[in-house]
Image (tube, rainbow, N blue to C red):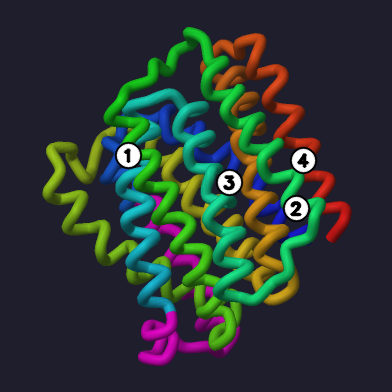
Amino acid sequence: MWAAATGIFLFSWGPVFVRDNEFGALPFAFWRLFGAAMWAVAALYLRGGRLDRRVLRHSLAGGLVFTVNAATFFTAIKTTAVANAMVVGATAPIFLLWAASRVFQERISFRVVLATPIAVAGMILMLVGRSGGSGDASLTGDVLAVVAMFAFAGYLVASRIARNHLSALEYQAGWSTIAAGLMLPISLLSFDPLVIADGWSWGVAATMAVTAGLAHLLFNYSHRYVPMRALSLLNMAAPGLAVVWAWFLFDEQIGGLQWLGIPLVVISVLAVVLDE
């Protein structure tokens, strides 16, 4: 549970820094995945593992859906408010609870059933209550955020299945290598340069490669030990934190309704996590 919570914390502030660089959305997504793949593969071989056919086969589904998530989410972050993209993305638990019940045969307790609509209501307040700020909302960005949400839900389901066959590090090396390979041609087909002359942007990309990669590793590690119902609601804590980071770093104003929505989400998540 601590691994999952730490992963969520790293997830929450990482996307905020996507805005603070000169890379285009797709090139940034590629370099972030490429860096994460490099350290994961290096760590795997240092521990005596191998990136063989077995690892790649079980990592394929996760790599494919995460590529869709990365391409759409990073573009959404660049084209709409951080709050919008994160809040829309956090509705994934609605679908993950269905997967927990139907696919993984988990029993959904009354507390989870009660906490989920409260958390969703909190997210709606956060979205509706967004006011002004440096990140203006756009319909295109919000639609891309919805696509990214479905892809991320698929990634978590694929990850849970893959962890029945692979260690967390094997899976991290496998899916990130596949996703980086797929993102390269996608990035080259975009109108944004793959290489730029801006040291700060490279530093942000490198930081994201390490921290976001570590977040995925920790979260995927927890798949074997924490029920999907708890992981799905734990994801809802990220938007509240992301809104705070966006307010603190980029002056994205927080409206009155958001101040009500954030604690609703956090309290609902804590209730389920503490129960688990």
Residues 245 and 145: in front is 145
Q: Position of residue 94 (x, y in %)?
A: 57, 50
- Marks 2 and 4, how far apart in space? 9 Å
Reading the image, the residue beneath label 3 is 11
Tell me which label, 4 or 1, sits earlier in the chain. 1
Q: In the rendered image, which quarter is residue 239 located in? A: top right
Kind of residue at disc 2: Val
Count of residue discs? 4
Q: In the displayed structure, does residue 137 sit left or right of residue 229? A: left
Report crowding for label 1: few under 14, some 14 to 19, many 20 or more residues within 10 A (C-alpha). many
Q: Residue at x 71, y 36 (%)?
A: 118
Q: In the displayed structure, does residue 63 sit left or right of residue 272? A: left
Q: Position of residue 230 (x, y in %)?
A: 72, 58
Q: Is residue 33 on the magenta stretch?
A: yes
Reading the image, the residue beneath label 4 is 268
Q: Which mark is residue 144?
A: 1
Report crowding for label 3: few under 14, some 14 to 19, many 20 or more residues within 10 A (C-alpha). many
Residues 39 and 145: in front is 145
- Marks 2 and 3, how far apart in space? 22 Å
SS class of the residue under badge 2? helix
SS class of the residue under badge 3? helix
Reading the image, the residue beneath label 2 is 112
SS class of the residue under badge 4? helix
